[in-house]
Amino acid sequence: MTGLLAAGFGLGVAALALKVADGSHPALDTTLSTTTGCLFLLAGAVAHVRRPANPIGVLIALVGVALFLEDLQFTDDPVLYTIAVPLRAASSPVIAHLVLAFPHGRLRSRWERLLVASSYLVVLALGVLGLLFSDDPRDLLAISADHNGRGVADRVLGLAAAVISAGVVLVLLYRWLTGRLPQRRLLSPVITIALLGALTSAAGTALGDGQPLSGPLLQIYRVSFCLWPLAFLVGVLRARVGNAEMIRLLLERDGTGLAALVQDDEVWKDSRSIDALNAAAGLVLDNQRLTAELEQRLAEVRASRARLVAAGDDERRRLERDLHDGAQQRLVSVVLLLRLADRRADLPPDVRTLLKSTVDELQTAITELRELARGIRPAILTEAGLSAAVRSLADRIPMRVTLSAGPVPRLDGAVEATAYYVTSEALTNTLKHARTDHVDVRLAVDGGQLRVEVTDQGVGGASADQGSGLAGLRDRVQALGGELSVDSGSGGTTVCAVIPLRT
């Protein structure tokens, strides 16, 4: 790069001296052309320092060298003139090469390589053709002084330059329209100035030299072309991942967006972007790992809670059997023995009265024990299912209960037991606190879920906060992967449990 810059600035000094000595160029045009070439050289140097592994800096500097080579045609030295004339449009193919390779420095497709190679060949061939048909005494290769041949070569060369310029603009537009956000951000300065220059140049040329607006339009073109190397440099300096793009990547848990963005290799040619990529990739992987660990632990907690619920139900069934087969049967046996004793004729009246009172107390104890066993886990729930158990529960409640139950099949034992206890607790709370004589109960299976709703029109005030019976039931419902909600206000209370069906 150092040798290229030295050659470029040397050519720039020589071109400036030749233009000044020629005397046919306005000072503004000379200043703008010299400034443009120097800016391309400086922009190329900065781009090379910024991204030494990317050849884009060399291409930007080569445009400056080509611009100064074009001005060597104003020399009086025949040898230098003969060399310079074929290069009088050298910047056109180099600019086409730069645009097609921007910003990663390489031609990515066969068609791009073909277009660039054709540009170099056409411009060089037309330059040599113009050199052959010349009456200039400085031309050492002239074989004919045919002005028509030279004019045709110049017109074709101008047409080729226009076609190349149009192709450059179209390629820029296509890349901007089809590119993702980082690529658009890189191309925006370049394409803005390219469009401005192309439009003003085309308009000035179309108007002709005699029109008042032709001169100002062509000057706008020259000024915009002078600013073009800065646009390329801005694109190089902005070639990194923006904050918004990084946030989007980090929000994508699977990292596919990150992988897709990496394929835009023009974004990753500077060290800061590579560091940002490494950091983003590390954060994405850490996020995936932590998310997987959290999901695994949540699954273990849910499974553990489900096992606790199942163990509790098993223990309830064991207690029910023990009460039914143990204490309840023993009390029934005692009642039978006391009745046999009561049938003896020789018992005093006061003893007979005592026996009768004892039998009545034992009957009351048996009834209470039977209700206790039913509360632990009613036998009808095991035998007939949820709908029958809730209907039996509603019949025993001393208030009007409207039961709406759709087709509810036999479900998993834990699901049925949980739904039953939610209904029982809600009805008990309504009976104790709601100050109403009517409650609605709804059971429905919909979309793989069991929905239980208990609604009253009472005074409200119910809560599932810590310490209430509903709080324990909410934990039980959540252990099965469901949700329990309590909506209670002055217009009444609705307790709703949604429990996924288990297979």
Image (cartoon, rainbow, N blue to C red):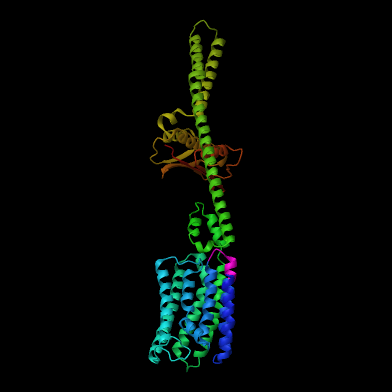
> Residue at coordinates 44% horizontally, 81% vertically from top-left?
161
Number of callouts in the render? 0
Q: Nearer the viewer, residue 372 or 174?
A: 174
Q: Quadrant of the N terminus?
A: bottom right
Q: Nearer the viewer, residue 17 or 190?
A: 17
Q: Tell me if residue 52 is in the magenta stretch.
A: yes
Q: Position of residue 462 (x, y in %)?
A: 57, 43
Q: Position of residue 426 (x, y in %)?
A: 52, 39
Left or right of 148 in this view: 458: right
Stretch of the chain drawn in magenta: 45-54
Q: Nearer the viewer, residue 222 or 436?
A: 222
Left or right of 224 in this view: 162: left
Query: Which residue is situated farthest in the bottom direction here?
Result: 210
Q: Position of residue 47 (x, y in %)?
A: 57, 69
Q: Is residue 448 above or below residue 310?
A: below
Q: Is residue 227 above or below residue 392?
A: below
Q: Nearer the viewer, residue 427 or 312?
A: 312
Q: Quadrant of residue 357?
A: top right
Q: Quadrant of residue 135?
A: bottom left
Residue 426 seen anywhere in this rendered image of the structure: no
Residue 17 seen anywhere in this rendered image of the structure: yes
Main SS, magenta region, reads helix
Q: Position of residue 401 (x, y in %)?
A: 47, 39
> Residue at coordinates 47% horizontally, 29% vertically from top-left?
378
Q: Quadrant of the C terminus?
A: top left
> Residue at coordinates 53% horizontally, 68% vertically from top-left?
56
Query: Which residue is situated farthest in the right direction here?
Result: 467
Q: Tell me if residue 238 is in the magenta stretch.
A: no
Query: Which residue is situated farthest in the top direction here?
Result: 346
